[in-house]
Amino acid sequence: MKITYLGHSCFLIESNGVNIIIDPFYDEAKFGPKPDFVIATHGHFDHLGHAEKLCKNGAKFIGTGELGNYLKSLGVAEAHSMNIGGFFDFGAFRLKLTDATHGSSVDMIHDIGRAVGVIIEIDNKTIYHAGDTGLFGDMELLGRRHNIDIAMLPIGGNFTMDIEDAIYAVGLLKPKIAIPMHYNTFPVISANPQEFVDKVSGGLVLDIGESKEF
């Protein structure tokens, strides 16, 4: 399995013959992977990103029912709607949505569903993408319930956890590898990812465009 960091909170997962993009806010001119599945954790522009375009070009959308219906109203053909609960088996991988403490709107004014995190089981690995979230106690439950191999956690503060809270989150989740995200895209979320990885077990910084085999 290969994971590539495309910037902000966007990751490309390549495994089992499928390409999965999470929170597709990235530089398409620089990185042009063609995904089979697009996942958005919530409706904010820096997470829903290029979902409409990618899904109109053949990718299948996965997200909350509200986001799925919104994209269908824009002409997206395939959207698999979910909510916080159990896994759904997509064949090459299984996926479930989790809690996240954050808002969700498509225009930063009108709410559209809720923000979520994502757990993906693929290629005998468990990946947790926290989405945009503050620290919350049930991260400990997620850590007990799932043997998390890779956790992708926001560290930029202001809108999400900062480095201090993300470090605490690693203690609750107990992942084997912790990758920071959602930092330095805008001045208000400036953070040093090395400060995070130096203080957690299994911390790993991926530069934008960098890939790692797991």
Image (spheres, grey):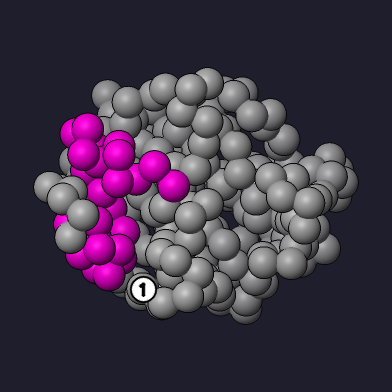
* Label 1 sits on residue: 112
Query: In the image, 204: left or right of 151?
Result: right
Question: Image quadrant for the N terminus?
Answer: top left
Left or right position of 62 against 72:
right
78 and 168: which one is in front?
78
Question: Residue 134 vs residue 70: left or right?
Answer: right
Q: Position of residue 103 (x, y in %)?
A: 51, 74
User: Would residue 56 be seen by someone viewing this image from the given angle?
Assistant: yes
The type of residue carrying mark 1 is: Ile
In terms of secondary structure, where does tag 1 sit? Answer: loop
Query: Could you tell me which residue is drawn at 75 percent across and 55 percent down?
Result: 189
Confirm whether the magenta stretch covers residue 60: yes
Asked if residue 112 lies in the magenta stretch, the reply is: no
For image coordinates 74% across by 67% down, the residue present is 158
> Residue 16 location in percent, x, y?
29, 27
The stretch in magenta equals 49-72
> Horizontal and vertical percent for residue 14?
39, 27
The residue sitting at 48% across, 55% down in the picture is: 45
